[in-house]
Image (tube, rainbow, N blue to C red):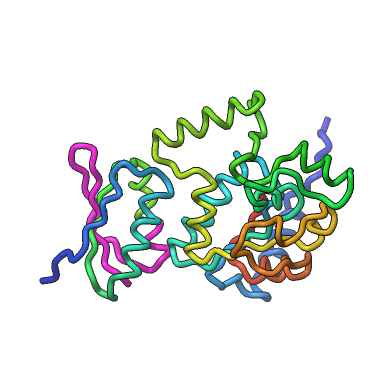
Amino acid sequence: MGAQTNADPDELTRLIEAALEERERHGPNAKNKITIIAWDGHLDRVWPTLILSTTAAASGMEVSVFFTFWGLFALVRPERRITGKDWMTRMLSALNPGSTARAKLSRYNFAGLGPWMLGRIAKEYKTPHPTELLGLAQEMGVRLIPCQMTMDLMGLTKDDLIDGLEEPIGAATALLEMKESAIQLFI
Amino acid sequence: MSTVTTTVDARGQSCPGPLVTLHRALKEARSGDLLELLATDPGSKSDVPSWAELSGNELLEATEEQGVYRYVIRKG
């Protein structure tokens, strides 16, 4: 009995060809630029985001990183332990401490033992910590852009965030940044 | 014959250290200058050629001796 397949190879070929044609029409995203959407604030996500950002900048690429939702907490000043405009946003900030120095691991956090051990190992192998990479990124001209909506939602003010950031932007501007980039990532 | 004008010592550094250090040194250099990068990070074997392609600089030499990788780069 002929097994039913839901993917007709001819149909797939047509779809792929149509997609390639579509790409041809719009031209390749030629700008030597990378835009990263930093959505997650965990140490093990922010770390690769910053490694890629600094490496791209070192390769002469233009780099924009858009910090949204939990990712924005990575840009909170280390000394600003509690942020927020009311009890709910303050409680969220208590559960989710800001800054790369306080960022938790997405797994094996073990009440801070995981990040501490990872930090020790990284130091041994001379891999810069995200806090150091954040400074490096700024020094290298990486554009660190806060999400305006997240700031409003979480009750974060400009004073809560580290210095040297770009003006906060919205989703449409973030899309524009992505559209003109050769590489777009959501981390 | 052109000679190496700057040595960038990134021995002991790990990703993304060597490339960041190299990038800093390149900013001081002029187009056509030859720079030498010393690294111990095994990741540099693939990363330095990739970086050269991305950044438009030319990788002229890549050698290894006793765990030290040596790259000669001409600034583009």
* Vertical comparison of B16 with A151: above or below: above
Q: How many marks?
A: 0
Q: Residue at x 53, y 61 (%)?
A: A138
Residue nearer the viewer, A183 or A96 = A96
Rendering coords of residue A129 (x, y %): 50, 43
Q: Residue at x 66, y 29 (%)?
A: A107
Rendering coords of residue A84 (x, y %): 81, 50
Toward the right, the furthest residue is: A87
Residue nearer the viewer, B27 or A100 = A100
Q: Residue at x 62, y 74 (%)?
A: A27
Which corner quadrant holds the N terminus of chain A?
A: top right
Report the side of A158 relative to B9 (left or right).
Answer: right
Query: Which of the 4 quarters of the picture holds residue B51?
Result: bottom left
Within the magenta stretch, is there residue B54? Answer: yes
Rendering coords of residue A172 (x, y %): 78, 69
* Vertical comparison of B48 with B67: above or below: below
- In this view of the protein, can residue A21 be seen by the observer? no
Please give the range of residues in magenta.
B51-76
- In this view of the protein, can residue A132 be seen by the observer? yes
Rendering coords of residue B72 (x, y %): 23, 59
Q: Residue at x 71, y 55 (%)?
A: A160
Report the side of A124 relative to A113 (left or right).
Answer: left
Toward the left, the furthest residue is: B1
Within the magenta stretch, is there residue A11? Answer: no
Residue nearer the viewer, A26 or A135 = A135
